[in-house]
Image: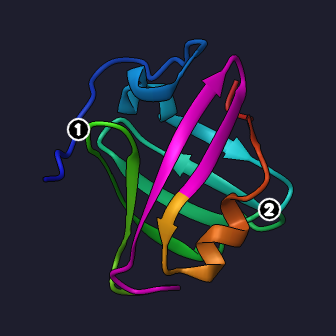
Amino acid sequence: MLLLLVACGGGATTTSGGDGLRLSDLSAVWANGIVTLRINDAGEFLVQPADSAEQALMGGFVARDDRRFIFVSRVEGECPGAAGAYRAEVNGDALTLTMEEDSCRDRVAWFEAAFTRVDG
């Protein structure tokens, strides 16, 4: 069963990891030199090329089950309607997404490198 989390508040990240993360811990703008990942408090995400804030590669929503985050793509863009399960770890301004299951090879490649928070 998937549970969509809708978080309120400032979206400030805290140093935490593993199963204790909330969606609000991921709510930020993250970059890893390959892509920029934007996640908002409502659970929507957008993946853009690192060198273009005008182009969207993929968008969708993030859901949370009891131990991981599920990135579900919209029907347009890369990997339409595909879901990918990732464990997340936030440590200060660093986000690491570890793939558990994802049929979208593009997303796996984009998320492989660790992210750094870039929205202040």
The residue located at (50%, 52%) in the rendering is 86
When asked about the image quadrant of residue 28, the answer is: top right
Left or right position of 110 against 87: right
> Secondary structure beneath disc 2?
loop
The residue at which mark 2 appears reads as 50
Q: Is residue 71 above or below residue 106?
A: above
Q: CA distance from mark 1 to mark 2?
A: 27 Å
Residue 83 on the magenta segment: yes
The magenta segment is 78-99
Residue 95 vs residue 50, the one in the foreground: 95
Q: Amino acid at mark 2?
A: Ala
The residue located at (26%, 43%) in the rendering is 65
Residue 89 on the magenta segment: yes
Q: Amino acid at mark 1?
A: Leu
Color style of the picture: rainbow
* Residue 35 image offset from top left, x and y in percent: 74, 61
> Secondary structure beneath disc 1?
loop
The residue at which mark 1 appears reads as 5
